[in-house]
Amino acid sequence: MSRRRGATLTKALLTVGCLLAAPLAQAISVGNLTFSLPAEADFASKRVVNNNKSARLYRIAVSAIDRPGGSEVRSRPVDGELLFAPRQLVLQAGESEYFKFYYHGPRDNRERYYRVSFREIPTRNLTRRSPTGGEVSMEPVVVMDTILVVRPREVQFKWSFDKVAGTVSNTGNTWFKLLIKPGCDSTEEEGTPGICVPGTWFASRRCASRGTTIWSITTNLLRSAIPVR
């Protein structure tokens, strides 16, 4: 497999998912780890579910990032740029509720990214004695990282395909998902997923394989496909 600059976010999120799958099986659930605020919308919402057997307190923290990935640069958002509500909430076992995010920053043709961390905190401190004599928490604090994408005012969904190099490049101004399928009739489970933010590319040997179909998807309604001949 060749270098996948555009797949950095995918790999990072998959790594987090694999590392946390076991301990979080009974913990917080936030759905997709990447969510978007469309240009025409006033706010984006994120549903949080308490899958524990007891109550939990939920808080969030937001950082602006230059672009998603392992080498992202984080900064504090300008005051008032991205607001959210509620500040915190308590959910009983099995309950769910929405956090809402309101963007008041510049409305131009540049896409913006924010790392939103959901923090799940036990409402009671259950401990047990460790072999060394200390106390160990039975219900640890859990943090789940997600990415909020604020779409440009005028979305330019553009991409190019280089069959020789086996790359798909994002030449527009908004991110999109990729699904490289071995054929038109194959299932999504058989495909290779990827994510491309503006100015990056996704590389895979499958891109150059005869019979492959490359789907690029920016929303549920806006998508295109290229069959490789």
Image (tube, helix red, strand yellow):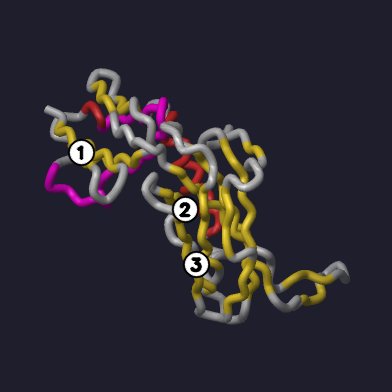
Q: Amino acid at mark 3?
A: Tyr
Q: Position of residue 202 (x, y in %)?
A: 36, 30
Q: Which residue is mark 1?
A: 224
Quadrant in the picture for the C terminus:
top left
Q: Nearer the viewer, mark 3 or mark 1?
A: 3
Percent x, y of residue 217: 28, 42
Q: Which mark is residue 98?
A: 3
Which quadrant would residue 218 be assigned to in this image? top left
In this orientation, which residue lies closer to the viewer: 206 or 219? Answer: 219
Q: Residue at horizontal 71%, vertical 73%?
A: 138
* Left or right position of 224 against 141: left
Highlighted magenta segment, given as a residue range? 184-206
Q: Residue at x 34, y 25 (%)?
A: 171
Residue 41 visible in the picture = yes
Q: Dot 1: what SS?
A: strand
Q: Label 2 is placed on what type of residue?
A: Leu
Q: Is residue 60 above or below residue 98?
A: above
Q: Residues within 10 Å of mark 2 (few under 14, many from 20)?
A: some
Q: Is residue 204 magenta?
A: yes
**In the rendered image, which residue does mark 2 sit on?**
33
Element at badge 3? strand
Mark with earlier residue (3, 1): 3
In the foreground, 80 or 124: 80
